[in-house]
Image (spheres, rainbow, N blue to C red):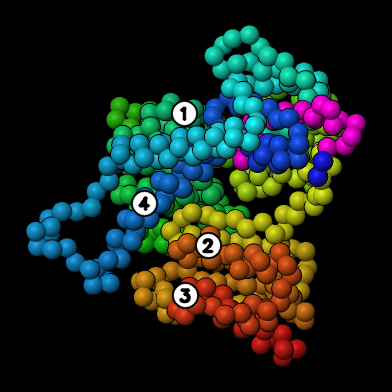
Amino acid sequence: MTIPASSAREPVHVVVVGGGPGGYEAALVAGSLGARVTVVERQGLGGAAVLTDVVPSKTLIATAEWMTIAERAPELGIRLTDDAAKRDLSVDLQAVNKRVLELAEAQSADIRGRLVREGIEVVNGTGRLDGPTRVVVDPADGGEARVLEADTVLLAVGATPRVLPTAVPDGERILNWTQMYNLDELPEKLIVVGSGVTGAEFAGAYNALGADVVLVSSRDRVLPGEDEDAAELLEGVFRSRGMTVLSRTRAEAAERTDDGVAVTLSDGRVVHGSHVLIAVGGVPNTADLGLEEAGVVLSGSGHIEVDKVSRTSVRGVYAAGDCTGVLPLASVAAMQGRIAMQHALGDAVAPLRLGTVASNIFTAPEIATVGYSEEALKKQGSRFITTTLPLARNPRAKMLGVRDGFVKLFAHPEAGVVLGGVVVSPRAGEHIFPITLAVQHRLTVDDVAASFTVYPSLSGTTAEAARVLDARVQER
């Protein structure tokens, strides 16, 4: 597309505040549509997703995965030689974290390089609104503030870990998830407060790396917002690997002791450990940005309210990512940013559809989901049929020594349209893709069942589940 004639002599100026997935993807789209683009970022390109959150945590988890693979080696017939019989696998956490941070920095540098090659200006500093068409930047080097006049503004300022007043992180013993990479040694006993996605992922990773882990959950089970069968399976795996899971209790406070930490629970118990990770969600970085003064409406939680094309309450001001509270996923942030620029610059645009978003929890096994959940289908009174097939009977799973996991599909009982699915397995984030395609394009279980799969493969269980549901549809 081309910029309208009225602005052809001087390109539209788009200012993006925040260089995370929502910001840099928006910048690339705006640049490709002919706009002049300036990205303001205070931390580094890629934002928290690349530097302190998604990329580092998933790199750490990928390292921990090798330990779980090694655990299966003996049952596959792999033995240490006599010379190595006394050598146990161990983790050099300092080396692990050094690699984690180096990879994050390399990814950030790659993003910066891409933006620069596309002719996008990158400004290091903190941006804030001065009205709806002006962004004031306080440079990272402490120099004089710079004023950017903008035709369109995109706010992609992200979120930061929530702080409990009674458990303020000190970066040494009481930690949030951005500080875990400062550790030089594996915690002797790590207490993880919070059993949501972040808490479960870190608990699983450090358990696999060899730490004694206690997971504190305020709900009946870990991952309370996820598929119940998947969450129960994962909790069982956690317990079988020696993790202590304390359910239905909250952490009231955490404090330093002479040699570690003491965490006080709501039931009166005190749990002692060497370190504690506070993983109780995030808060949007929307304070002191001039939003209220510019007329941008915030929710009660401080998130920027947006519609399905990322518009805020102010004309010409858009927002994307965790600061909007839509879905805390990098993929959703990126899509919001792309949609925002397509809409702002007059390109063809499809509103955001959350029903087709695939998500993955990087535990071992992973839990991937897409489309409607079983709970949502029941809550809205939808008619559906479902089947769950265990991976243990899959030939490829047997070859790999995989025992824990399943594939669950939901479909309409008459039309056979795939409504959603859950995959619990190693690399579930890869295996969910065919179900995502089915949900996105409203394919039927017959469509999925009739498609070829590699034999043997874990994805064969997805086709088998579709055949089971297709037979039930045909019976009606």
Q: CA distance from mark 2 to mark 3?
A: 12 Å
What is the number of the mark on residue 13?
Answer: none
Q: Which quadrant holds residue 157?
A: top right
142 with respect to 362 (left or right): right
Label 4, secondary structure: give it: helix
Taking the magenta stretch, the answer to whether it contains residue 10 is yes
With respect to residue 380, does 268 lie above or below?
A: above
- Where residue 467 appears, x then y in whole percent? 61, 83
Q: Which quadrant holds residue 67?
A: bottom left
Q: CA distance from mark 3 to mark 1?
A: 45 Å
Report the mark closest to the observer, 4 or 1.
4
What is the number of the mark on residue 169?
Answer: 1
The residue lying at 34 percent from left, 28 percent from top is 257
Taking the magenta stretch, the answer to whether it contains residue 118 is no
Q: Residue furthest left?
A: 83
Q: What is the span of residues highlighted in magenta in the rendered image?
A: 3-23
What is the number of the mark on residue 64?
Answer: 4
How many residues crowd mark 1 within 10 Å: few (<14), some (14–19), many (20+)? Answer: many
- Where residue 354 appears, x then y in whole percent? 72, 54
How many residues crowd mark 2 within 10 Å: few (<14), some (14–19), many (20+)? Answer: some
The mark nearer the N terminus, 3 or 4, is: 4
- Where residue 94 appears, x then y in whole percent? 31, 37
Report the mark closest to the observer, 3 or 4.
3
Q: Say which residue label 3 marks.
A: 457
Q: CA distance from mark 3 to mark 4?
A: 24 Å
Q: Say which residue label 2 marks.
A: 430
The residue lying at 42 percent from left, 76 percent from top is 396
